Amino acid sequence: MAEIRVENLRKSFDQFTAVERSNFTVPDGSFFAMLGPSGCGKTTTLRMIAGLELPTDGQVLLDGEDVTFRRAAARDIAFVFQLFALYPHMNVAGNIGFPLKCQGMRRREIHERVAETARLLRIEHLLSSKVSKLSGGDRQRVALGRAMVRRPKAFLMDEPLGALDAEFRHLMCSELRDLHDRINATTIYVTHDQLEAMSMADTIAVMNSGRIEQIGSPQQIYDRPASMFVADFIGSPPMNFLKFESGLRAGERSVSFRDLTLAVPEVREERAPGPLVLGVRPEHIRLSNSAPVRGRVFGAEYLGTTQIVTVDTAYGRVAARLPSSLSVQIGESVGLSFRSERLVLFDAASGSAIRTANFGDAGHG
């Protein structure tokens, strides 16, 4: 396997810029996820790394070697597509071994490689089966096997679980990560599903409108979002936003609006006065009769051990993740208290984080 480095990568189609100056490094053996909504540029970035698209500008380096304008076949990278693209007239063994056959490898070595790959994927019992008779999950394993059998330097995966139902996706997430660890792969994984990225990746790059908004571990992305877009895209329900018209100077530890004052993380840099947005995750909200933020319960969604309670306040609708044992009634007047050390401040004009919570490596709350 090998390190992948992307430097100032840019791709334009006439007047439309699909990818704007992307920079990131995927260390050898790392699982790197590119996460974002449809049309944000993540698949275009992956195709440039694979050699299926030529960049307008920038470089792609594989194991320290510039491969920016090298043909896809010469990059020693395996690509797994969303649609499995298997050969229906071949059995599983034939599909997995086809790339080796195209390389002119001897039949005995092909047989050994296919058997080894099938053992890793736990599909030895399917080698003689026609792919048309397989389930979606097994077809995905065959597609992975066809990519793995060449022993490439890196794996690129474009929404490989998108065609599976929810139960299979959950199962395949665990199996993909386990497989990645067993073969010590270097993997770039493209998805619009935050649960896939959060559960599998070592590092996540969140993309929006062709730009990378933030790169970090799943916990960093969740706990310390760099922008309102990241905070809103990550989390279910997403982060709540409360807008304040008053500015905040360096050293201040609270924001005030109307008759409300809230403790916030300290701002350490001077900034121009302007509207602020206060971000708080649903799990960092509690009900309190003495809390300064008050509202009426709009609805409650039962989720087993927890419930999502939505409250209409003067600052907008707020979602709180609360114990399901807590009894709330629609229309009830409640107070909301926030964990001040977990709050995030954003500049309302730019959407960028001004100050994120400064805490240890505790879990997501």
Image: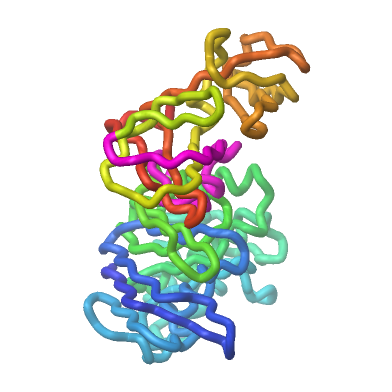
- Residue 55 shown left or right of residue 68 in the figure: right
**Residue 175 shows in the view:** no
Task: Give above or below for 15 relative to 363.
Answer: below
- Residue 312 shown left or right of residue 210 in the figure: right
Q: Residue furthest right?
A: 331
Which residue is pictured at 39% across the width and 87% down the height?
57
Q: Give the extent of the magenta segment.
A: 222-251
Residue 201 lies in the magenta-colored region: no
> Where does residue 82 sit, x and y in percent of width and height?
60, 66
Residue 246 versus residue 119: which sits nearer the camera? 246
Which quadrant: the N terminus?
bottom left
Which residue is pictured at 48% across the width and 57% down the height?
350
Which residue is pictured at 54% across the width and 67% down the height?
209
**Residue 328 shows in the view:** yes
> Where does residue 176 sit, x and y in percent of width and height?
46, 52
Which quadrant: the C terminus?
top left
